[in-house]
Image (cartoon, helix red, strand yellow):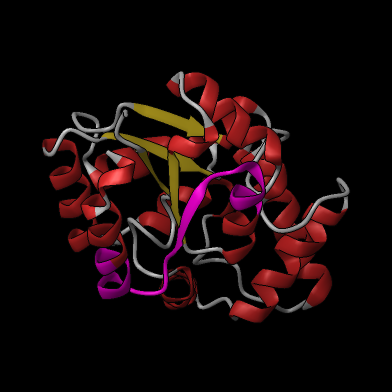
Amino acid sequence: MNKPIFWFDFGGVLTPPIKAIIYQYQQKTQLPANIMLQAVKDTAAEFGYTGLEPLEIGLISEQEWGRRVKNKLTQLQPNIDTSKADLEHFGRQWFENIQPNTLMIDKVRQLKKAGFTIGLLTNNVREWEAYWRPMINLDDVLDIIVDSCKVGCRKPDQTIFQIAEQQANTTAQHCILIDDTEENCVAAQKRGWQTIHFIDNDQVLKEISYLTANESLE
């Protein structure tokens, strides 16, 4: 039987926790996190989406999104100081000085060396690719990258799991998703995937070891 494909999420798995990156962004820009998150939410709502969805499915450009978010910030707090925030180039500032999760990066390389196929299944933004790919430095390891902004749908939409299977020329039962968002794990399970809900490195490393030792998966 063929070995399973390990699909890694990017943000929160191959990077520090998203909450930690939000805190760092607040320190860089002096924008209160709660106000920034509300502005992002209000911007998405204009398109009938939530969070970063308009960016993550490639609906709007980063520059347009940044302008809209800045307008929302000033509506929410008219005297807010946005001078330290480069919202039209949000990704550049967001990823500045962010270090990858080296333990998980090392695990990706170990799995590849052991003969497993490695995929990246990420909700991401077109303009951010110039920052996140060099950060994790896995271009020589990743067999498949399925990026929401390039396929026009995002986790937890069932369609993106189907696209991943098609691109890997495999079936659901051979796919294992490692993701820090429980909703994405639940959606993948409904598709027939196995999942590891990322809580911390130790937990995930133990679960990966269990799966790779299970002869029924090899």
Magenta stretch contains residue 28: no
Q: Nearer the viewer, residue 168 or 89?
A: 168
Residue 132: horizontal and vertical position, in percent?
A: 36, 44
Front position in the image: 46 or 112: 112
Quadrant location, the C terminus: top left
User: Seen in the image, is 175 located left or right of residue 48?
Assistant: left
Q: Quadrant of the N terminus?
A: top left
Q: Is residue 112 left or right of residue 64?
A: left
Between 121 and 214, the one lying in front of the other is 214
The magenta segment: 187-206
Residue 45, compared with residue 30, is above or below; it is above
- Residue in the picture at 58% in, 54% down: 87
- Give the total of numbered labels: 0
Classify 203 as above or below 11: below
- Splitting the image into 4 quarters, where does residue 159 fall? top right
Residue 20 screen position, x and y as percent? 41, 75
The verdict on residue 195 being magenta is yes
* Quarter holding residue 129: top left
Q: Position of residue 163 (x, y in %)?
A: 59, 26
Residue 22 spot, x, y in % from top left: 49, 71
